[in-house]
Amino acid sequence: MRQSYDAVVVGAGPAGSVAARRLAERGFRVLLIEKRQEIGVPVRCAEAVGADSTRPYIEIDDRWVKARVSTYSIHSASGACVKIPPTEPTLVVDRKVFDWELARLASQAGAEVRTRTEATGLLIEQASVVGIRVNSLGRSSEVQARLVIAADGIESQVARWAGLKTMPPMADYYVGFQYLLGNLRGRFDPTNCEYHLDQQAFPGGYGWVFPKGDDTANVGLVIAANRAGDVSAQRLLDRFVERKYPEAHILGAVAGGVSATGALKKMVTSGLVAVGDAAHQADPLTAGGINLGMIGADLASQVAADALARGDVSARVLSEYETRWQNRFGAQHRALYRIRKLLTQMEEKQLAHLINVASGLPLQTMGLRELIFTLFKTEPRLLAEVGTLVTTGLILK
Ligand SMILES: Cc1cc2nc3c(=O)[nH]c(=O)nc-3n(C[C@H](O)[C@H](O)[C@H](O)COP(=O)(O)OP(=O)(O)OC[C@H]3O[C@@H](n4cnc5c(N)ncnc54)[C@H](O)[C@@H]3O)c2cc1C
């Protein structure tokens, strides 16, 4: 490891690997560090990605595709159900291999990749980030960097050390727990992702069953941290699994958090940018963050590369990244955030009614925007909210 780089990227998840690769492709000297021993493990994810959105970043090999999803089904507590087509073809992948391959592509582009190397602090001079402190394989050192990229996930410390406000409100912090369940042949549709909206079973969040082959599935939940009460996410998931799949074998278990706020307003400071979950870029409705994190990293590295080339990595110059993100996702994510709030505040009767109305609509020919508008029109109490969403720019594809 050298003593100085153009850019040091902290965290080799999807966002970090894409940022490192893009900067290396532009000819900069890049170090990508990952605190874990091995990239991609443990997997804290239901492993669903949009096939089209991932294409600019990775060529997905059929061998790591565990399921091809052609529908999503939405279920209410009382059993109302509607199947909708996804906005883009969805794949359930082996996330371990997916993350590993992204890091390999960064390395192939010229980035130096180091595992078991943890950022332990920032070097700051005159209010500007100028490098990091690292512990690599038990040895501490300082590494100078013209730019630091915080891609260290939802528990990001790097962004916080730089003064970015990364703590989401409890109501918008999803606590997640998931089992990989086996012995489920014939118990779910391997071409469908199930979402369960049941406020008693998943307070403030939702549950899911994502196929991972014909026999196994990722079965998990997220709940709002402020609604968890005395019952843990794991206990809530146990109840769901005992009820729905008593015969299942537990092949794996993971816990993790996701912020559902929409991206941080301030994602840069002098000498540092935050990307992916570290910048809260996950979808504020579904909490899916893989594709959005890679897009965020791509936007950030375009701006960062220009800033490095100009020799000016001030917050003013880097803030162009925040502007590009807001132009692309700002209005859409604010609308999705409101929709999540509406869905999680709805009574079961109202939700079941909406689902029943939706199941009678020509869903194959409707976009999500039309669908949401049509549904909320059937509920007079929600009309005012829909009006607000549309006038504030509900730009859903
Ligand atoms: C239960 C669950 C299910 C999910 N399911 C989906 C899904 O199906 N589809 C989807 O799109 N999204 C899903 N998500 C969200 C998705 O996993 C994240 O949005 C995505 O991983 C964010 O990528 P990232 O690169 O920003 O961060 P991460 O993937 O979290 O990567 C951050 C990396 O930084 C490393 N790191 C942290 N601190 C340091 C440090 N100090 N030094 C060095 N390295 C460090 C970590 O070890 C980690 O490898 C799910 C999340 C959870 C919790």
Image (cartoon, rainbow, N blue to C red):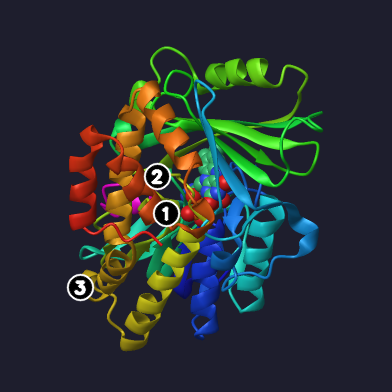
Q: Quadrant of the N terminus?
A: bottom right
Marks 1 and 3, the one that precedes in the sequence: 3
**Marks 2 and 3, how far apart at CA:** 30 Å
Number of dots carrying numbers: 3
Residue drawn where x is 49% and y is 77% of the image: 23
Q: Point out residue 269 in the picture as x, y percentages from the top left corner.
A: 26, 63
Q: Point out residue 364 in the picture as x, y percentages from the top left corner.
A: 54, 56
The amino acid pointed to by label 2 is Leu
Q: Point out residue 110 in the picture as x, y percentages from the top left corner.
A: 61, 79
Residue drawn where x is 58% and y is 71% of the image: 57
Q: Which residue is mark 1?
A: 368
Between 74 and 184, the residue placed more toward the observer is 74
Marks 1 and 2, the one that precedes in the sequence: 2
Task: Determine whether the residue tagged by mark 1 lies in a helix, strand or loop.
Answer: helix
Q: Which residue is mark 2?
A: 285
Q: Which residue is mark 3?
A: 316
Crowd band around label 1 with a 10 angstrom C-alpha radius: few (<14), some (14–19), many (20+): some
Between 76 and 280, the residue placed more toward the observer is 76
Q: Quadrant of the C terminus?
A: bottom left
